[in-house]
Image (spheres, grey):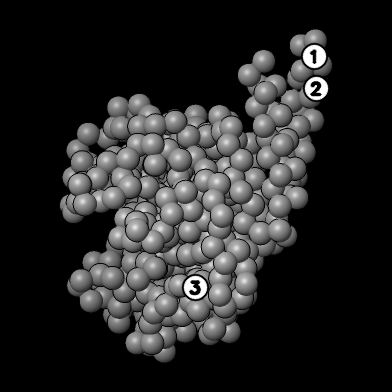
Amino acid sequence: MASLRVSYLLLLQSILAFADGGSIGINYGRLANNLPTPSKVVELLKSKGFDRVKLYDTDSEVLTALANSGISVTVALPNDLLSSTAADQSFADNWVQTKISQFYPATKIEAICVGNEVFADPNNTTNFLIPAMKNIHASLAKYSLDSAIKISSPVALSALQSSYPSSSGSFKSELVEPVIKPMLDLLRQTGSYFMVNVYPFFAYSANSNDISLDYSLFKQNPGVVDSGNGLRYNSLFDAQVDAVFAALSALKYDDVKIVVTETGWPSLGDTNEIGASQDNAASYNGNLVTRVLTGGGTPLRPQDQLDVFLFALFNENEKKGPTSERNYGLFYPSEEKVYDIPEVAGSQSTLVKGSKSQVPPTSDATKTHVSAKLYLTLLLQFWISC
């Protein structure tokens, strides 16, 4: 009986491995004074099945700890270095040489975020973004790393002029010509992708009288029909992602892929931060993991898999702002879970452990694929639990 059970496990894992699903990564922020050592963090990532991690800098201790771990790493050039990088190619060369090539390929650096939410930066660094991106790419080419390491820059949804309904998605007019189009041209030229940070929590918290909580948390709900194209949405996340796709399409950049570089839900917030709770955070992140790994795209792009980075690995006690900012973590600094969500067993193997809720398919085009794959996933869970 034991050998039969093992055979079934191997068969089901093989089926799941060849099914098309997205990938789940995690943001590893370090604005805290009580976090585990980087080597312990790497062990935590591996034990929970995360094979992609996104950083907010290029800390040498962290990059060294990630070496030979099998984890793909996205690093960042901070906003405060954009002006120097934009103004001086030699500065960019030195940064790439000391922060990237020194660690690659032992550390599997797959992408560089040149800045973060630059358009929302109060220090007004937008004008430096495109020159900085071009110089970093030139530096990667100098060290023969440009084919292996992508460059992009995470964009907040506040860069959109319109996002509702999703089909009306468009970028702010003042950003289009000076920065959005040049960025998209560079991404297309280098085979990179558009990074976007997507937070249904913000929209729900500010409009809880108009937006359903179930719709925000991927729970069963009647859905929302887009008046512009007739597509039905079962989650606010999908609607927000499709608003970005629509904005790209309006500028004739349908071929540029999207990666969601941040999304999450806080487990604690101030009294005016409606919806911030452990239960809601567990529902959002747990249902998101299941929804991404069981395959299928958005209603507008049903065949495109979703690649998503959860925010964040830890609660960070030194982050400024409202209480929610310090409570997005899946884990406390002690490595104890803040709440339970499915574990991630690799971005392409798409095995989810511990989830018992089926996420509504985002469109009829993905319903069969998602249901069949989720059935196999749940069947595999049953065998594991036996």
Q: Is residue 182 above or below residue 257?
A: below
Image position, residue 230 (x, y; %) = 62, 72
Residue furthest to the top: 1
Q: Amino acid type of disc 2?
A: Ser
Q: Residues within 10 Å of mark 1 (few under 14, many from 20)?
A: few
- Mark 2, residues whose alpha carbon is within 10 Å: few (<14), some, or many (≥20)? few
Q: Is residue 165 visible?
A: yes
Do residues under tags 3 and 2 come within 8 Å of each other at their CB atoms? no
The answer to whether 381 is drawn above or below residue 258 in the figure is above
Residue at the disc numbered 2: 7
Q: Position of residue 61 (x, y in %)?
A: 33, 42
Cβ atoms at labels 1 and 2 below 8 Å apart = yes
Residue at 54% across / 83% down in the picture? 250
Whichever of labels 3 and 1 marks the residue nearer the N terminus, that label is 1
Left of 93 or right of it: where is 364?
right
Pick whichever, 205 or 11, lies toward us: 205
Task: Identify the mark at residue 165; answer none if there is no mark.
Answer: 3
Spatial CA span between label 1 and label 2: 6 Å
Q: Nearer the viewer, residue 358 or 15?
A: 358
Name the residue type under label 3.
Answer: Pro
Q: Earlier in the sequence, mark 3 or mark 2?
A: 2
Amino acid type of the residue tagged 1 in the rendering: Ser
- Mark 3–mark 1 Cα distance, whole angstroms, equals 53 Å
Picture coordinates of residue 247 (x, y %)? 50, 78
- Closer to the camera: disc 3 or disc 1? 3
Q: Is residue 286 left or right of residue 377?
A: left
Residue at figure coordinates x 53%, y 85% from the top left: 251
CA gap between label 3 and label 2 equals: 48 Å
